[in-house]
Amino acid sequence: MIRASLILLLVPFAAQAQLSLFAVSGTTESPVAGTYQIGTVATGVSKTTRLRARNTGAAGVTVTNLAISGSGFSITQSPSPPFTIAPGNFQDIYVQFSGTLLASYSANLQIVYGGTSVSVLLLVTVVAAPSLATVSTGNGCTGPDPGANTIDFGRIQSGQTAACAIVLKNGGAQSLTVSAVSVSGVGFQLSNAVQTPIVLAPGGSANFTVNFAPTSATTYSGALTVNTQTYPLTGIAFSAPLPTPSLQFDAGIPASGQQRTLTMQLGSPSPIAASGSVLLSFRSASTVMSDDPAVVFVATGARSVPFSINAGDTQFKLGGQTGAVFQTGTTAGSISFSISSNATFAGSASASMTIPPAVVAVDNAAATSRAGDLDIQVWGFDNTYSAGQMSFTFYDTAGNMIHPGAVSADFTSQFHTYFAAGNGGSAFQMRVSFPVVGDSTQVGAVDVKLTNSAGAATLQRLTFNP
């Protein structure tokens, strides 16, 4: 008995589900009672009415039949029954009407669900079509094309304006009045307000201009309305190419072992905001080493750095700064720069810096006297990878050259083996030791000459320290 009572209680609860009908205009819903007046429609013209069946109950509603009866009426868009409308949800039903005879028309729209139904009587009156002005276009656009009546502005650059000359003409034998002219759609507007009504004598015409002024690269659509006639408007905007960027280096003669600054700018303000990357590449002049890993942007430690520019600016930001610092490494060759971006530039942007061969660069040197030995240490780099020939001239503590004068040595093989091992550019640290017979403390200084394919570098009077 308790279970049977619970089932009985559910029956009236399920019956609470119901549909309410509304007419929809834009985002506005208006309740529809037993009769809905569609209004007037000109002969030969179709008119579509949007009706909305909303479930205001607490349970789903299954529509089992949807039908309309009446000459000139048809349902053009709706699911085929059966379909379900969830609680609080709705289903739009589009009803189209067209008529050719001057008369009043009616139709009954019925929605059947759950053993009940909702119905509404639709009313419409067909009136004579008014005399219409013909629309043609001049410069700045094409159309209206046959059938769709579309007026096409074609492709223009965003930020620019295309002006389309519109001509209204009365081809009839009686005067014609144009009571309304309007333009809708983002990017489209009348160049000047059109003063209506416009009375066109037989054979007479009137002109006005519609502008297409897109602000970004995309496809645009709108509409020109003249009395009851509507002409779709369309146009495509593309981004303006940016001027070719200029890549520039800070002042100074290029050489290995430097930190230089790259800047990037335009000769005129950028029409749009843009971003991308500056790419660095290196080509070695040496056959020993094909690359130098030290040639990178300092900020990223890599061979690319992001760039950006705002609309109206001429200076690019590189890694968020006005310039990007890069290292020239320790290898003779060519450092090249290019850009990668989704934006379109008027021309390709590139720059290069040649790092010439140079004599051995010495960062530090030391001479040390030990019991029975003299040690000479040099820290530096050879961007030609050809060092090896050396000479050493010793002097006593009084400054006199010690016989036999310059002592030559050839360490080319050792240097080549070291560089070929790929230890990171041409930087090196070397130590040369000379055994001494006698009192090594009497040797006061040494001159060191380091020779490579670019010439000789001389270290004078390195003083021996104990």
Image (cartoon, grey):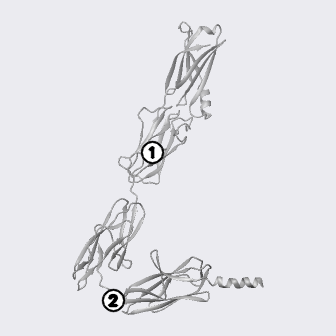
Locate residue 396 relative to residue 371 in the image: left or right. Answer: left
> Which of the numbered marks, if any, corresponds to residue 317?
1
> Which of the numbered marks, if any, corresponds to residue 142?
none
Q: Residue at x 29, y 75 (%)?
A: 136
Would you place residue 225 above or below residue 100 in this image?
above
Tell me the distance, in whole angstroms, between the alpha carbons under discs 2 and 1: 66 Å
Q: Residue at x 57, y 30 (%)?
A: 427
Quarter in which the N terminus is drawn: bottom right
Cβ–Cβ below 8 Å for labels 2 and 1? no
| Residue 418 rendering spot, x and y as whole percentages | 62, 30
Residue 124 appears in view: yes
Q: How many residues crowd around disc 2 within 10 Å: few (fewer than 14), some, or many (20 or more)?
A: some
> Label 1 sits on what residue type?
Lys
> Which of the numbered marks, if any, corresponds to residue 128?
2
| Residue 144 rendering spot, x and y as whole percentages | 34, 75
Would you place residue 81 above or below residue 417 in this image?
below
Quarter in which the C terminus is drawn: top right
In the current view of this chain or complex, which residue is farthest to the top? 398
Judge by depth and name the residue closer to the eye, 52 or 463: 52
Locate residue 107 relative to residue 5 in the image: left or right. Answer: left
Q: Earlier in the sequence, mark 2 or mark 1?
A: 2
Instruction: Kindly state the secondary structure of the residue where label 2 is placed.
Output: loop
Corner quadrant of residue 166? bottom left
| Residue 312 rendering spot, x and y as whole percentages | 37, 50
Q: How many residues crowd around disc 1 within 10 Å: few (fewer than 14), some, or many (20 or more)?
A: many
> Label 2 sits on what residue type?
Ala
Judge by depth and name the residue closer to the eye, 379 or 95: 95
